[in-house]
């Protein structure tokens, strides 16, 4: 199975990649240079091209801001990271 993990360079993402790669083909997407696809910013057109090229069976989204204090202070940034990305994936 082809599994695309968004946020693969984070703590949970890196562990999940190591666990799933035993029986699956993993496409790591993250901000790190160790990722298969480096994504600093997700845009609809770029993401659509990636999906057409790699055709993942499953997409696991781990992109999120989780620092509660930062989320309270930067509500627009939090909304963008935690909800707008879902709209892009959905389309």
Image (spheres, helix red, strand yellow):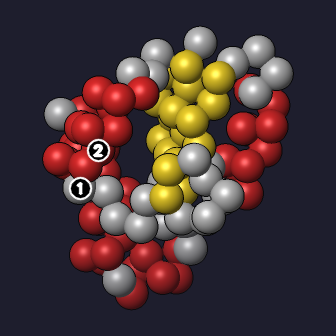
Q: Residue at x 57, y 36 (%)?
A: 27
Q: How many marks?
A: 2
Instruction: Residue 30: name its quadrant.
Output: bottom right
Q: Residue at x 43, y 76 (%)?
A: 71
> Whole-Å distance between the Cαs marked 1 and 2?
6 Å
In this rendering, the answer to whether 29 lies above or below 73 is above
- Could you tell me which secondary element the residue under label 2 belongs to? helix
Q: Which residue is mark 1?
A: 43
Front residue (pair 85, 51): 51
Any part of residue 83 in sight: no
Q: Residue at x 53, y 74 (%)?
A: 68
Where is residue 58 shown, x and y percent of the image?
A: 48, 21
Give residue 13's mark: none
Q: Which residue is mark 2?
A: 47
Instruction: Residue 74: name its quadrant.
Output: bottom left
- Residue sticking out furthest to the bottom: 73
Q: Residue at x 56, y 25 (%)?
A: 3
Where is residue 82 shown, x and y percent of the image?
A: 37, 57
């Amino acid at each position: 199975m082809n599994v695309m993990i968004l946020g693969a360079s984070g703590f949970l993402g890196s562990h999940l990649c190591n666990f799933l790669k035993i029986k699956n083909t993993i496409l790591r997407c993250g901000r790190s240079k160790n990722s298969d696809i480096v994504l600093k910013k997700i845009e609809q057109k770029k993401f659509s091209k990636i999906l057409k090229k790699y055709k993942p069976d499953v997409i696991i989204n781990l992109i999120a801001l989780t620092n509660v204090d930062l989320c309270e202070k930067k509500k627009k940034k939090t909304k963008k990271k935690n909800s707008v990305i879902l709209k892009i994936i959905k389309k």
